[in-house]
Amino acid sequence: MAIERIDVNVTSPGRNFVTVKVTTSDGVVGLGDGTLNGRELAVVSYLRDHVAPTLIGRDESAIEQTWQYLYRSPYWRRGPVTMAAISAIDMALWDIAAKKAGVPLYKLLGGASRTGLLTYAHASGTTIEKLNEAIHGYVEQGFQAVRIQAGVPGLDQIYGVHDSAPGGKYEYEPADRAETLGDGSAMRPTEETWDTRAYLRHLPTVFAGVREEFGPELRLLHDGHHRMSPIEAARLAKSLEPYDPFWLEDCTPGEDQDVLRLVRQHSVTPLAIGEVFNSVYDYQTLITERLIDYVRSSATHAGGITGLRQIMSFAAVYGIRSGFHGPTDVSPVGMAANLHLGLAIHNFGIQEFMPHSETTLSVFRTSYVFEDGLLHPGETPGLGVDLDEEAAAAHEYVPAYLPVNRLRDGSVHDW
Ligand code: GCO
Ligand code: MG
């Protein structure tokens, strides 16, 4: 049997998603997620113009070989656009293989290593009181772990912070419709202002307020979103220690791997990095020197099941665990891929879970389940996600970008 067709679907049910649909000569369909928030159409072109034509007629079961072909043969390696495209194809081929075997994908990956996946939710609030309200909502839903982000006095809108709807239902996820300028011919992302000193002073009081309300058991995570210098990151990691954080994520921009040595020298706060990485080489120093505790990549950006499994096998040798990226800009297809791999590998740690909106879930039909704080990919053969193409067609692509971040003096800062 062979790959007969490759279609690339772009839909925007609340936010943009890029989905690859591979159809085999015997009529089996596989789906893969290639969504790259804010740069979606670059991946679409890469797939339609440069990948799809080279794969028609090839054996769909040669997954490893196809991965190597797409990684090595273009000569230009890695990068978020290339790797998102490879991810989408790889996921679709694994989906097909598992559907043909008549089993949920995790069974092809070695079977379940656990009963379910410990999952964390995103709680946030402009004040500590509002944050605590949001956390109560998640605890009531059964979550055993929450990421906590709070407003900083003196700063308006900042990363990851909004006041939840009652019941802790999470609706915030950054990707603003681009602002249209003047005659509508130019578009720009929205802008935010940042002050690291104010944040560093405030965050320990947020952790203190949450611990006081919830006691020692609830796992608390925090995302620094790449905003600190090495010494600032070390200070923050150290100042959070009394509150027993589960992890501090992206305390510095991760591409400068060496600086994590400084953070480690000063603190025992567990560290998580990697949502913007796309290959095992981005982790080489971080893993071999054990400078992180959790791998933050997702199947959508790190080369699909094949690429992410490669990273996790390497990490396993060093006792480093997974904390796969699961924001709403990873589609339900990518989320399912994370879940199947997470269930199968030995070195699973925790899974991020921002539930998709009702609108998104009316286009992507999922079979994963959340119960007692644990996610499970379900028992449907393959990835277990269907794309309703008719419903998808009703939601046209909308240009949307993450905000830009500036210091008070106007300098561009990491967002
Ligand atoms: C997270 C992330 C996301 C990113 C988003 C960018 O930890 O989930 O930091 O919220 O900002 O994926 O596209
Ligand atoms: Mg993050």
Image: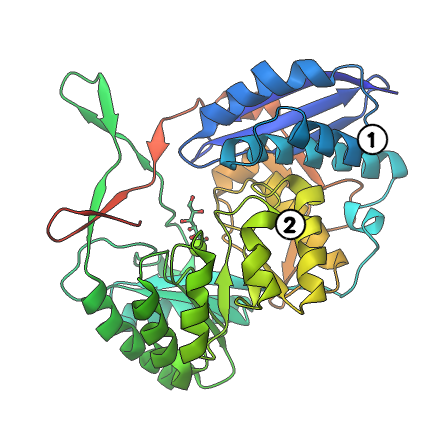
Which residue does the image show at 89% across and 38% down from the upper left? 101
Residue 338, labelled with which disc?
Answer: 2
Residue 134, labelled with which disc?
Answer: none
Q: Earlier in the sequence, mark 1 or mark 2?
A: 1
Label 2 sits on what residue type? Answer: Asn
Q: Is residue 324 visible?
A: no
Q: Residue 334 in the image: x percent, y percent?
A: 61, 42
Report whether the residue tagged 1 is closer than 8 Å to ligand 1. no
Q: Quadrant of residue 210?
A: bottom left
Q: Residue 174 in the image: x percent, y percent?
A: 35, 45
Which residue does the image show at 26% across and 71% down from the upper left? 200
Q: Residue 372 in the image: x percent, y percent?
A: 63, 68
Local packing at callout 1 (Cα closer than 10 Å; few below 14, some 14-19, many 20+) is few
Q: Quadrant of residue 284?
A: bottom right
Which residue does the image show at 23% across and 63% down from the upper left? 196
Q: Residue 328 in the image: x percent, y percent?
A: 48, 45
Whether residues under marks 1 and 2 lie with C-beta atoms below 8 angstroms apart, the answer is: no
